């Protein structure tokens, strides 16, 4: 039977769009399922504040009435204005190993983009940098984390066959938790005194929440030059605070503030939730919360979710402060291994921190781009 593409129009169809990945990766030991409730919150136009400056449509590919692929098309007008381009994004792309399916998915987004006046297509990307981005091209036998995309090894082959080229690469590191690097111990007190900064210390989640909005504001400044970035709005900051800070453990969060109590650097990490999400199939209920709670309380793997230093403080040792505090917590709680979040390969300042640890670069992801003729 011929391939058929259907635009997602109802809440029921949106759930089917989300569910497709769970059947495609069923039994895969490396894939990290998303929380279904987070997926719905992100993709629903009445839930995600990014729709104030974004447009999006979703399609599912069917053959013999069975889903064989899915894709989202997004236009982030704010990002296009920031980067002076007219590119439509594709994201949430999954497909069986059939070139007819992958091509049909890409072309429906390309045609939609052309109708909207776009001159090219790139992805995988989300509504913002807080969404997962970059197609896996190396490291298919490595454990994915919540902040990263996992996909089958045939995906990049299909994109290359369709004429896509590299736009940007993200890399990830895996490293052992060492004793606190000597460099950090020597640097900590010196940096605190020289720049009049301090680390916020608390074991109470509610005391960290007031710093969340400050962190996102600083992130807007620190990430401004990164590929495709568009500054988060106040509404997005509030939404991400509610979405992510519900899972935090204060011991694994480190904010560095100046004399005005403004954040100049931060490190956010969380016990790895991949195995818990696999057991729960991305659901909190009826028993998913139990697996997640166990993983948060006792775990030997930590995920380094988000790191940032204000441009005015980069190269001044601020990162050593938040790594020093987090490293102490890792040791105290028996963490054996850490996995970094994807970081742009050309972001040398951010990647330089890993030179202080024993580890390896084990994963690479790519955003692809193709300009229309």
Image (cartoon, helix red, strand yellow):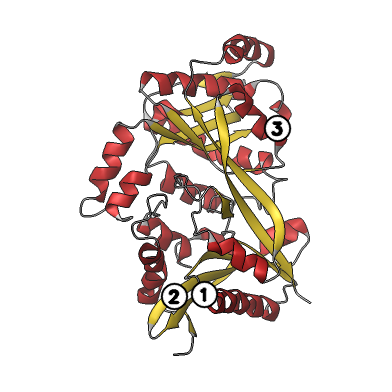
Q: Which mark is residue 349?
A: 3
* Residue 307 screen position, x and y as percent: 57, 35
Q: Residue placed at 71% from the left, 56% from the top? A: 167
Q: Nearer the viewer, residue 219 or 95?
A: 95
Quarter of the image where the N terminus is located:
bottom left
Q: Is residue 89 visible?
A: no
Q: Which mark lies nearer to you, 3 or 1? A: 1
Considering the numbered disc 2 on the image, is that residue within a helix, a strand or a loop?
A: strand
Indicate whether 91 appears above or below 243.
below
Examine the image and state in which quarter residue 154 appears: bottom right
User: Dot 1: few (<14), some (14–19), or many (≥20) neighbours within 10 Å?
Assistant: few
* Residue 171 screen position, x and y as percent: 61, 43
Residue tagged 1: 98
Examine the image and state in which quarter residue 294 appears: top left
Indicate whether 143 appears above or below 174.
below
Spatial CA distance of label 3 from label 1 is 40 Å
Q: Which mark lies nearer to you, 1 or 2? A: 1
Q: Nearer the viewer, residue 205 or 32?
A: 32
Q: Residue placed at 44% from the left, 75% from the top? A: 68
N-term mark: 3 or 1: 1
* Residue 40 screen position, x and y as percent: 40, 63
N-term mark: 2 or 3: 2
Q: Residue placed at 64% from the left, 57% from the top? A: 367
Q: Is residue 303 left or right of residue 100?
A: left
Q: Which mark lies nearer to you, 2 or 3? A: 2
Spatial CA distance of label 1 from label 2 is 9 Å
Asked if the residue under mark 2 is in contact with the one under mark 1, i.e. CB atoms within 8 Å, the reply is yes
Considering the numbered disc 1 on the image, is that residue within a helix, a strand or a loop?
A: loop
Residue tagged 2: 68
Indicate whether 197 appears above or below 207.
above
Quarter of the image where the C terminus is located:
bottom right
Asked if the residue under mark 3 is in contact with the one under mark 2, i.e. CB atoms within 8 Å, the reply is no
């Amino acid at each position: 039977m011929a391939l058929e593409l259907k635009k997602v129009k109802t809440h029921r169809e949106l759930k089917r769009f989300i569910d497709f990945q769970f059947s495609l990766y069923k039994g895969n030991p490396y894939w990290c399922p998303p929380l279904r409730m987070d997926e719905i919150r992100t993709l629903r136009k009445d839930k995600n504040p990014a729709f104030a400056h974004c447009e999006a449509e979703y399609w599912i590919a069917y053959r013999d009435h069975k889903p064989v692929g899915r894709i989202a098309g997004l236009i982030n007008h704010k990002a296009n204005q920031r980067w002076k381009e007219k590119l439509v994004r594709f994201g949430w792309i999954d497909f069986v190993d059939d070139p007819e399916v992958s091509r049909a998915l890409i072309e429906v987004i390309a045609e939609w983009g052309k109708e909207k006046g776009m001159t090219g297509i790139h992805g995988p990307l989300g509504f913002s940098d807080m969404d997962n981005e970059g197609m896996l091209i190396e490291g298919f036998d490595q454990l994915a984390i919540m902040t990263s995309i996992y996909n089958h090894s045939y995906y990049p082959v299909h994109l290359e066959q369709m004429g896509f080229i590299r736009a940007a690469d993200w890399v990830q590191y895996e490293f052992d938790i060492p004793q606190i690097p000597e460099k950090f111990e020597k640097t900590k007190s010196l940096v605190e005194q020289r720049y009049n900064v301090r680390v916020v210390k608390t074991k109470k989640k509610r005391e960290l929440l007031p710093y969340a909005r400050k962190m996102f504001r600083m992130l807007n400044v620190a990430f401004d030059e990164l590929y495709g970035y568009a500054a988060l709005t106040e509404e997005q900051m509030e939404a991400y605070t509610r979405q992510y800070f519900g899972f935090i453990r204060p011991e694994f969060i480190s904010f560095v503030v100046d004399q005005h109590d403004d954040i100049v650097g931060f490190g956010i990490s969380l016990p790895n939730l991949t195995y818990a999400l696999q057991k729960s199939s991305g659901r909190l209920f009826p028993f998913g919360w139990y697996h997640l709670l166990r993983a948060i309380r006792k775990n030997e793997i930590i995920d380094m979710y988000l790191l940032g230093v204000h441009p005015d403080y980069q190269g001044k040792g601020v990162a050593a402060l938040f790594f020093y505090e987090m490293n102490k917590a890792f040791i105290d709680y028996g963490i054996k291994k850490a996995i970094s979040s994807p970081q742009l390969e050309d972001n040398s300042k951010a990647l330089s921190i890993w030179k202080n640890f024993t580890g390896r670069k084990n994963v690479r992801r790519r955003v692809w781009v193709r300009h229309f003729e």
